[in-house]
Image: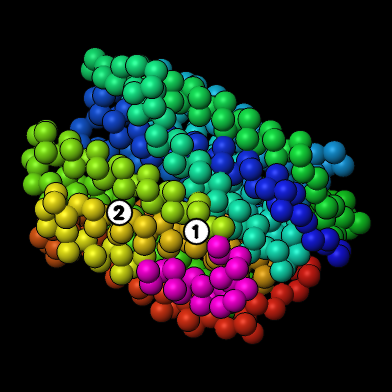
Amino acid sequence: MEKKRLSFWEIWNMSFGFMGIQFGWGLQMANMSSIYENLGAKPEEIPGLWLAAPLTGLLVQPIIGYMSDRTWHPRWGRRRPYFLIGAILSSICLLLMPNSSALWMAAGLLWILDSSINISMEPFRAFVADKLPTEQRTLGFSMQSFFIGVGATVASALPWIFTNVFNLKDTAEHGQIADNVKWSFYLGAFAFLGAVLYTVFSTKEYPPADIDNREKVKEQKKGFGAGVEEIVHAITHMPKLMKRLALVQFLTWPGLFLMWFYYTPTVAAEVYSGQTGSQEYAEGQAFAGLTYSFENVVTFLFALTLPFLASKFGKKWTHFICLSIGGVGLMGINLVHSADQSWMLFVIMACVGIAWSSILSMPYSMLADCLPENKIGIYMGIFNFFIVLPEIIASLFFGKVMESVLHGSRVAAVSLGGVLLLLAALVTLTIHDGLSKKPSIEKV
């Protein structure tokens, strides 16, 4: 089917729901560790409690991709039913989470929340490839990066806003959640659902290219076994470009995880010379949070330039440049030795914001160019493997590397993250245009 070029505002509408999804991710990333600790979790238990996100993504995304590839409703379309179902379930979890009365309840709700967010998020990636012609896909994925940056910036700032603007308490007794965090989750629930509803009702979908054969396919193959067979077939028959991009992702995301694990403690302990619980440590944490917000601002602003850069330099070279900037930026942490030099952290996180903007768009834009039209959902779900597997590995095993190889150096851990981004950039250069050719329909 020939796809028409969409206007800027049509692409805006179809991407707007991604901002709501980012409220779900942003709120949990900024607040779940403190919620766990308030409910009695020990520090060594926190990494295990965080495994919910990668594990649910590993299981849910290919299943939802498979299901959405085979879905069609004349009114609701192909992907939009999943946007809506995931948003409703996620919003319920966001309303319940800050009222958790026990650690097991919060951990259980996080599993359900992550599963629900993945139900909404995975079809959004396929949605761009479904709706847009090849020449507009970079703009579509860049628009998603823009809304991710906006959503992350606002969601991360909500507890501060509720404390400093609305005078809500930012402390609570042991076993309770502070009011500013509670109201952040409440607002996030409505923002999530509202943003997704906007996309659901403002956007229409094309029918699948193989719609005439769809009922016959359903009769021939249905049930759990057929789904597993198709997922396994897709994994073993990944396009060559997807395999190369998978390696890029497998190197990129551990670098990001090392930053998320150790950047804030590095700033608090190494730059501000604070001990855990001290005023200096708290000031360092707060300043690190401020630089994270700056990174998100850079992310959504830089996303606006990506379509121009990709048209001028190509997607491969654009991603190479952005990853290289991010890698050099993270390695720059070695130059910051005191609070007097903390302004340099804004430069470092601006570099990371540039890389992050590209990471959220360029690989998906390149991937969409090589996927068969009737398998976009399932392949986008499988592509997520190469994000969550490094996160699981890092969560389970990097502690020993930190202890025995890096000797507890947080600065070395963040620098290693930069090295991994640079390696990912080099692998990006091995991608060539001949790998991007695709069949229109793929048969199992």
249 vs 109, nearest the viewer: 249
The answer to if 337 sits in the magenta stretch is no
Q: Is residue 303 visible?
A: yes
Between residue 420 and residue 377, name the one nearer to us: 420
Nearer the N terminus, badge 2 or badge 1?
1
Residue 189's spot in the image, x, y percent?
Answer: 53, 27
Q: Which amino acid type is marked by label 2?
A: Phe
Displayed quadrant of residue 100: top left
**Rendered image quadrant of residue 155:** top left
Residue at coordinates 69% horizontally, 33% vertically from top-left?
197
Cα–Cα span, label 2 and label 1: 15 Å
* Mark 1 crowd level (few <14, some 14–19, many ≥20, 10 Å Cα): many
Could you tell me which secondary element the residue under label 2 belongs to? helix
Identify the residue shown where x is 59% and y is 76%: 312
Please tell me the numbered disc located at residue 346. Answer: 2
Q: Quadrant of the N terminus?
A: bottom right
Relative vertical location of residue 245 with respect to residue 50 in this rendering, above or below = below
Q: Which class describes the residues within 10 Å of circle 2: few (<14), some (14-19), or many (20+)? A: some
- Tell me which residue sits at (31%, 48%) in the image: 291
Question: For the residue marked with disc 1, what is the amino acid?
Answer: Phe
Secondary element under disc 1, as helix, strand or loop, is helix
Tell me which segment is drawn in magenta: 305-325
| SS majority, magenta | helix
On whether residue 318 falls in the magenta region, the answer is yes
Q: Could you say where residue 6 lies in the image, as x and y percent from the top left? A: 78, 56
Q: What label does residue 302 carry, if any?
A: 1
